[in-house]
Image (cartoon, helix red, strand yellow):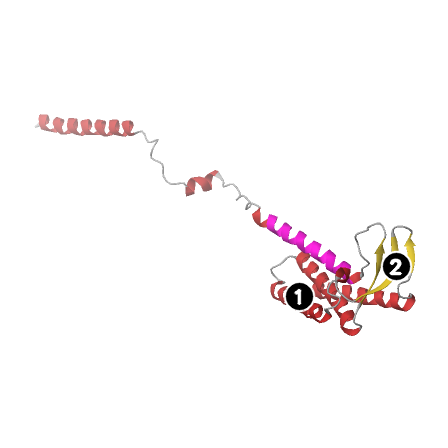
């Protein structure tokens, strides 16, 4: 669980530090071009979830976020010995991102967004916490798919037995016994016994 809490803390710290740097170093709604036409820093505030969803229902959004985070923490703590490391890391990233944005909504009433990818039109401006949530969800899906395939893999074949082991475990097989030969030997033994008895009688 050390790695789990470390990843969670790392995402929260990276999110809060970068937001503070943007707030202290940029004017609201201003833009700094980092790579022309590709990547800008644009300081905006978002009072809802992604793409401004539930901006007018922050209490509902906060309650929902707390419930999801609590459920994920409970699941990770309870199942950390039986789930894979990738799944554990993905859950930690989701939790860290959720907490990062939750802190802003609770204390400031909004979330600071600043990462602006110019070459992707359908992407809104986002932050480190959003990256943690998105990447965490993708890794979680990959982890579930990978573990599903692993469970469907056939069991490893047992090592081949040596001839001696196979012979020792194999049931007796009487199908190849030469019964005719046994009958013949029994007949000869009977004739010899009769002849011996006849010789004894004649000698008297």
CA distance separating discs 1 and 2 = 30 Å
- Check residue 49 for magenta coloring: no
Toward the left, the furthest residue is 204
For mark 2, does the 10 Å Cα neighbourhood hold few (<14), some (14 to 19), or many (20 or more) residues?
Answer: many
Q: Which residues are magenta?
A: 129-149
Question: Please, what secondary structure does the residue beneath circle 1 have?
Answer: helix
For mark 1, does the 10 Å Cα neighbourhood hold few (<14), some (14 to 19), or many (20 or more) residues?
Answer: some
Query: In the rendered view, does 169 fall on the left or right side of 21?
Result: left
Image point (87%, 53%), residue name: 39
Question: Please, what secondary structure does the residue beneath circle 2 have?
Answer: strand
Q: Quadrant of residue 94?
A: bottom right
Image point (87%, 60%), residue name: 42
Q: Which disc, if any, is residue 183?
A: none
Toward the front, the furthest residue is 56
Residue 146 position within the rendered picture, expressed as x and y whole percent measured from the top left: 64, 50
Q: Quadrant of residue 97?
A: bottom right
Residue 138 position within the rendered picture, expressed as x and y whole percent measured from the top left: 70, 54
* Number of numbered discs: 2
Image point (9%, 25%), residue name: 202
| Residue tagged 1 | 68
Image point (62%, 58%), residue name: 83
- Quarter of the image that includes the N terminus: bottom right
Query: In the rendered view, does 198 fall on the left or right side of 35?
Result: left
What secondary structure is the stretch in magenta mostly built from? helix
Task: Examine the rendered structure and indicate whether residue 183 appears above or below residue 96.
Answer: above
């Amino acid at each position: 669980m050390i790695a789990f809490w470390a990843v969670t803390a790392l995402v929260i710290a990276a999110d809060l530090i970068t937001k503070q740097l943007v707030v202290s170093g940029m004017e609201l709604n201003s833009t700094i071009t980092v790579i022309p036409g590709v990547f800008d820093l644009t300081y905006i505030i978002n009072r809802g979830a992604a793409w401004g969803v539930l901006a007018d229902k922050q209490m509902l959004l906060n309650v929902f976020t707390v419930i999801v985070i609590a459920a994920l923490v409970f699941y990770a703590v309870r199942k950390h010995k039986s789930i894979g490391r990738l799944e554990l890391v993905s859950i930690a990233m989701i939790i860290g991102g959720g907490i990062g944005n939750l802190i802003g909504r609770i204390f400031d009433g909004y979330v600071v967004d600043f990462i602006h990818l110019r070459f992707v039109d359908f992407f809104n401006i986002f932050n480190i916490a959003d990256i943690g949530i998105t990447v965490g969800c993708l890794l979680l899906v990959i982890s579930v798919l990978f573990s599903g395939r692993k469970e469907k893999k056939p069991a490893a074949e047992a090592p081949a037995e040596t001839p001696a082991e196979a012979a020792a475990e194999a049931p007796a097989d009487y199908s190849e016994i030469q019964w005719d030969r046994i009958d013949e030997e029994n007949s000869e033994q009977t004739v010899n016994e009769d002849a011996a008895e006849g010789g004894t009688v004649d000698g008297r």
